[in-house]
Every structure is written in C-alpha cells, then in structure tokens.
Amino acid sequence: MCIYEKGGNFADKTTNLLVSMKKITLFLAFLGAVCTMQAQENFQGVMKIKMMTSYSKAYLKFVPGSVSGVDTLEAYIKGDAVHLYSKQTGIHKIYKDGMLWYYSENVKQGFVLPAPPPYSGELQIIDKNDTRTFLGQECAVKTYLLLFNNFTTEVDCWLAENAFNISAVALDNINNNVYGADMSHKIAMKVSLRTSMSGNMDMIIGSSKITQAVMMGSENKGAEMSSSKIYEVMDIQPVPIDDSRMVPAGDIEIEKVIVGAGTSGQHDAEAIKAALMADPKIRKKVESGKADIDDLVADYQEKMKKRMQEEQEKRDKVLEKGVRPSVFLGKDTQKALQKTLDDGKAVGITADASAYGAALFRYEGELLTKNMEYLKNNKKIVKEEENVQPVVYDLDDEWDF
C-alpha cells in the first residue's frame, strides 16, 4: 500500500526530513565544538596575592635590594603571558613568548632576557594526605623541600586544582617566580616558605675571614642567613586583559641582556640584524644580493655561542683552580668549594644555566638596589631588623597582615 501526501510523495518527504535532521545534527555538533573550544580557552584575568617577607641582615648583605615587609602581588594573566606587579615595591615582571621583562616603575629602568630555565636542585614532595577548603576550593596539604647546592627551602602549602583553566605556562611562571617550584601545576592558595643557607655555604663563608668579609661584611660573622615568606591568594577574577598590559610601560628604559653560553643568541636576531646592516659594507652586499642577511645572522650567532662557551670553560677552569690550596683559603673552605662544584655536576648544572644565573643575579641585584634606594629616599620602607630567624607560620592560623 502506498501513501501519497499533497505536495509530494512519501519518498520525497522522507528524504527532505533526513536532510533536515542531518543539518540539525551538524549544527548541534558545531555548537558543541564551539562550546568545547570556549571551555578550553586559557584563563584571562587577575590573581591577587598578599604576602609578607622577612630577610635577615646577613641575607640582605648577600642578596642586596630585597625588601622586608608586606606587599600585594597582582598577576595579570592572558593565555600563556603573565604580568606580575608588586604594588608596594613597584617591581614588574612580564613573562611572554619565552622572554622575561624585569623593571622598576620607580627608577624607570629594567632589562629583558630569556625566561629562566628550570631550577637545578632536588625537589621532595611530602603529601600530608589531608585537605583544606580555601576560597571555595578544595586544597591538598603538602610540603615541598627544595635542596639546592647551598640553600635549603621548605614550603608548606595548600594546593587547589586548576579549576580556572589558567595556562600551564603562566601558572608555572607564577609559581616558580613566587614560590621557587612549579607546585605540580596547581594553584598555591596559601603558602609558608622558609629559606636558609646549607651547611656547605656556612662553611664557605665562615671558615675564611677574607671570604666572609667580602661576601657578608665583617660585622655579620656568625649571623643567620635566612628568610621567611608567607603568601595568601585574595582573589582570582576573570576579566578581559588588554594586550598593552603585557608590555613594559612606554617610559621604561629596557636594556637587553646578553646571556652567556649561547642562551640568548636565538632571541636577539633582530638586534644582530640591525647591527650588521649598520655596517655600510655588509648592507651593500645584502642589498646587491651578494649576501643573505639571515645567513649572516645565523653565522654570527654560531660564532657568539662558540665564543661564550669558550669563555664559560675559562671561568670553570679559574674556579677549579681557586679550589686548590691557597694561602687565602683554609682547608675547610677548599673542601666546601669543591663540594659546590661536585654538587653542581651531580644535579646537572650546565654552562647555560650557570651563565644565565650569573647574568640574572647581576642585573636583578643592580635593579633592586636602585629601587630600594628610591624607596628609602621616599620613606616607603621601614628600617630592616637587625637579625631575623626563619619563622614557621601555621597555615591554619588567620593571618592579619
């Protein structure tokens, strides 16, 4: 039996219905894909962290420019990029496209270099098998132990899952910058951190009057070299972040840092190209087609990398010679220095990491020292305490700073 309907037969109606259903299915699939893409988009917004730091006098002598006291850290996050702003000290750090811009809004100066490589040290994670609820987030209670060559850092923390879908790159840069570890890619909601010199560094500094006087000042012999820091997330707010937030302010003088052992050659291609083209002879060859500027840049980078590696090898030899018996160094100091070299090799410290650390330490120290002088001159910081011991803050306490 055949059934006919006005306006067309059954087969036509069935075909049209199937086509319509297929279009609806495709449309729904499209909507689902869009929703999935939107759900997977990385976080864009602001994380606010309040913090309090205490540095011993001896520590400040060793790491100049650090400021004790209360501060508020604002982290502006847009995808992988993050802009860290310390409101009380006026220090900014921008991590973007594998680079770090580090500057002071007070002295209007700063520098740029590749973002730091992973730290070299042994990390131990102690899971307390306990949880806390903070800002509506369930947090795991953990302790991180970072055993460096000459420093030991202990971190008690409450870690929340990344429910905000913050980019892993941005989150790692925040955690490594603030806490010194990647925190297993979690959000550190509340943290108590203590750092102190290991016995090896104490031995290096204390066993030689000359070494101790150079590194710490003769008045600080035997003083505690330590710091205590506490952090607490105040808010995580999704808001649109303008691209202008991810570049230094226009009135900041930024210096490009050339890091040794080839770590920066790839990042300075444009600067190298400009320098080469400034040479009339090279520019003439490039413009006439006798030379390719990209080939010249690559050749220059390779030569730079080789030269810096040779310089690093020379520095290593000088350091190794310095460990040998000397009228200036006691036997204990020689053993401690040798242990530092051996420990560095054991944890895989490379020439790249060594050169990077030296460059960052120098430029950061100079910038923070200038910034501290500005804060002092403008009465924005209080006098440092004479001696500070590392304090263990209880995460379960209410912090009223």
Image (spheres, helix red, strand yellow):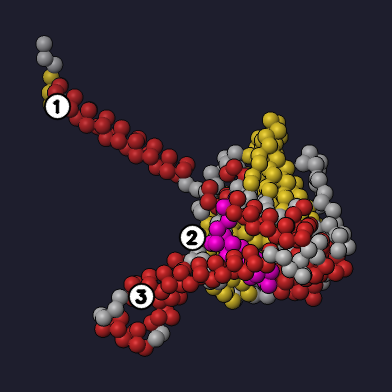
Residue 69 % position (x, y): 79, 59
Residue at 38% of width from left, 82% of height from top? 277
* Cα separation between marks 1 and 2: 57 Å
Q: Residues within 10 Å of mark 2 (few under 14, many from 20)?
A: few
Q: Secondary structure at mark 3?
A: helix
Residue extending furthest top?
1
Q: Which mark is residue 344?
A: none
Q: CA distance from mark 3 to mark 1?
A: 69 Å
Q: Position of residue 144 (x, y in %)?
A: 68, 43
Pointer 3 with pointer 1, Cβ within 8 A: no
Stretch of the chain drawn in magenta: 347-367
Q: Earlier in the sequence, mark 1 or mark 2?
A: 1
Residue 216 in view of the camera? no
The residue beneath circle 1 is: 12
Q: Is residue 344 left or right of residue 114?
A: right
The secondary structure type at the circle numbered 1 is helix
Q: Mark 2 and 3 residues: CB-CB less than 8 Å, in contact?
A: no
Mark 2: amino acid: Asp
Q: Which residue is mark 2?
A: 97
For marks 2 and 3, the one nearer the N-term is 2
Quadrant location, the N terminus: top left
Q: Please name the residue shown 70% across and 40% down the image.
A: 143
**Label placed on residue 296:** 3
The residue closer to the viewer here, 51 or 78, is 51
Q: Position of residue 272 (x, y in %)?
A: 43, 76
Q: Is residue 124 left or right of residue 266?
A: right
- Disc 1 crowd rating (10 Å Cα; few below 14, some 14-19, many 20+) is few
Name which residue lies at 41% across and 69% down.
302
- Residue 351 magenta-drawn? yes
